[in-house]
Amino acid sequence: MPMECPICGYARLGEALRCPKCQSALTMWKNCDMYGRQAYRAGLHALSEGRTEAAAELLLAAMVLAPEQPVYLGAYGRVLGKLGRYREAAFVLKKAHELAPARETKAAWDMAAALAERPLAGPAVFQDHQGMVGEMPGGEPEEAQPSATPEPATDQLPGSERPPDPAPSPEAV
Ligand SMILES: [Zn+2]
């Protein structure tokens, strides 16, 4: 992705370490850009190996290093969703959508927001930006409550008519 000068917006920086237009030093920005990209790639790799927790750490790093990259935010938000951290997922996906409005991002955000309100809902399918489909765990049954009425298999979409589950949300962090 072509980098713009973060100070003046000059777009054709090339490999210069100083912006030709405003003369700002760019070393730090370039390092953040590079490390952010590395963390993002490592995060996707960890995700592909099923190391979801590690992927979350790496994608968080990518987001911190390059907070204006909607792709990083989108990936991090989806991984948070996979981890059942729906509230955080909704927050991050909202930011991703604000940076780069996209239908899939909005759908993922809506789903995370809906699941955040209903922590005991069944597993839902999250589709990420690469077209991979991952299972999002429902509320982790650490204290599985024996319920007389079995939960119906839910692949619910946001906006279904069922009222929010009154159960408290699982530990999110
Ligand atoms: Zn500049």
Image (cartoon, rainbow, N blue to C red):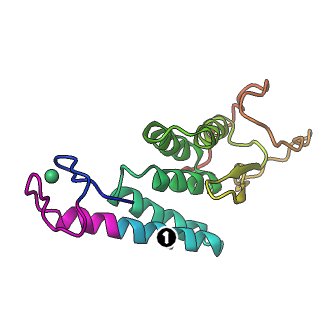
11 sits to left or right of 23: right
User: x and y percent of residue 92 in the render?
Assistant: 48, 45
When the figure is inspected, residue 2 is found, relative to residue 93, above or below; the finding is below
The residue nearer to you, when weighing 75 against 54, is 75
148 sits to left or right of 115: right
Q: Secondary structure at mark 1?
A: helix
User: x and y percent of residue 147 in the render?
Assistant: 86, 42
Total residue callouts? 1
- Is the magenta region chiefly helix, strand or loop? loop
State whether label 1 is within 8 Å of ligand 1. Answer: no
The residue nearer to you, when weighing 120 against 123, is 123
101 sits to left or right of 113: left
Q: Amino acid at mark 1?
A: Arg
Identify the residue shown where x is 47% and y is 44%: 96
Q: Residues within 10 Å of mark 1 (few under 14, many from 20)?
A: some
Identify the residue shown where x is 55% and y is 50%: 172
- The residue sitting at the left extreme is 23
The residue nearer to you, when weighing 10 against 38, is 10
| Magenta-colored span | 13-34
* Residue assigned mark 1: 41
Does 27 lie within the magenta span? yes
119 sits to left or right of 57: right
Q: Quadrant of residue 51?
A: bottom right
User: x and y percent of residue 110 in the render?
Assistant: 63, 35
Q: Quadrant of the N terminus?
A: bottom left
Identify the residue shown where x is 64% and y is 72%: 48
